[in-house]
């Protein structure tokens, strides 16, 4: 499973302060830390409190790339901000994200084609997040069809089945697992899958434990990537161990260190 490091996000006070003051220190520290721990991408999110998201996204992308060679995952509902980030990315990026809403899919897939970017598609539409796996998969199929119509390789598409907190949407958990399994049957090659890992534990007491267990269970059901805490040592160890058990990596006694060093 690919870890998309979540920490360069304006929701965090240190990153919000860095954006306000145009001080790259915290941004670059988190970029280096997440890369060293084995993240495969850096999620870049300016947060909700920024007045000029376009310039903030461009700045975040530029300073993060000064400290890390990882590709970026540009995270915003403001597609002008995402395009500003794509313009300064030194290597193909990932767009996070687009729901199964036609005008938004047209905008995002056009950008993805222009900048050779990967895309995270959300299994939701104007009506919100479905409860059952069947409806989630139907929306995933819409995303697959639109991706293909824009000439983008399906291997560049990640479907997010959308996870709700287990303390308020406990019945969604099995539906998410079933969605992950069925997404792999939608096309050949199939789209990849991704989740926002910390969503499962929002508002719960044992957040780290819930995140780790959910990650391993989801991997066994076909999860390819997660936007997650790339500096959680035990999460990284759990993911590395699951990859060994699922025969994704070759076992060696130092397999956790090998996982961390895969992008270095």
Image (spheres, rainbow, N blue to C red):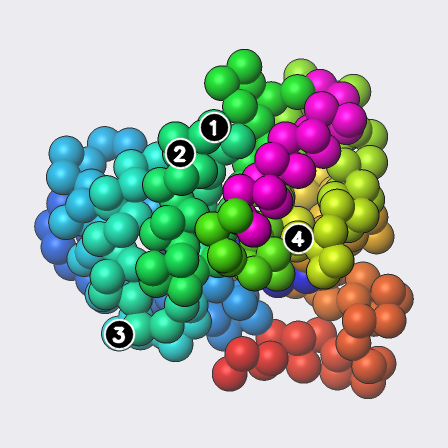
The answer to whether one can see residue 142 in this image is yes
Do the numbered discs 4 and 2 sit on residues whose CB atoms are within 8 Å?
no
Dot in front, 3 or 1: 1
Residue 76 x, y percent position in the rendering: 35, 40
Which residue position is annotated with label 1? 101
Do the numbered discs 1 and 4 sit on residues whose CB atoms are within 8 Å?
no
Residue at position x 84%, y 52% in the image? 220
Helix, strand or loop at mark 1: loop
The question of residue 262 being in magenta is answered with no
Residue at position x 14%, y 45% in the image? 20
Q: Quadrant of the N terminus?
A: bottom right
The question of residue 132 being in magenta is answered with yes
Q: CA distance from mark 2 to mark 3?
A: 31 Å
Disc marking residue 236: none
The answer to whether one can see residue 200 in this image is no
- Boundaries of the magenta span: 131-148
Helix, strand or loop at mark 3: helix
């Amino acid at each position: 499973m690919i870890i998309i490091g979540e920490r360069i996000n304006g929701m965090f006070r240190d990153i919000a302060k860095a954006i306000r003051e145009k001080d790259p220190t915290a941004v670059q520290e988190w970029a280096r830390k997440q890369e060293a721990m084995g993240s495969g991408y850096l999620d870049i999110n300016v947060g909700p409190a920024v007045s000029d998201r376009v310039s903030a996204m461009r700045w975040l992308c530029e300073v993060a790339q000064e400290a890390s060679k990882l590709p970026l995952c540009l995270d915003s509902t403001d597609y002008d901000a995402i395009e500003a980030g794509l313009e300064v990315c030194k290597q193909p990026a990932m767009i996070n994200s687009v729901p199964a809403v036609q005008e938004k899919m047209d905008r995002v897939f056009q950008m993805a084609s222009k900048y050779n970017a990967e895309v995270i598609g959300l299994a939701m539409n104007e009506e919100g997040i479905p409860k059952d796996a069947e409806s989630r998969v139907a929306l995933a199929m819409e995303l697959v069809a639109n991706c293909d119509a824009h000439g983008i390789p399906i291997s560049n598409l990640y479907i997010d089945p959308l996870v709700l907190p287990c303390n308020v949407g406990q019945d969604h958990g099995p539906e998410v697992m079933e969605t992950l399994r069925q997404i792999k049957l939608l096309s050949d090659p199939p789209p990849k899958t991704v989740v926002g890992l910390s969503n499962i534990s929002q508002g719960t007491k044992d957040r780290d434990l819930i995140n780790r267990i959910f990650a391993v269970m989801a991997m066994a059901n076909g999860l390819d990537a997660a936007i997650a805490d790339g500096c959680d040592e035990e999460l990284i160890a759990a993911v590395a161990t699951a990859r060994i058990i699922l025969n994704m990596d070759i076992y060696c006694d130092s397999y956790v260190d090998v996982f961390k060093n895969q992008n270095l």
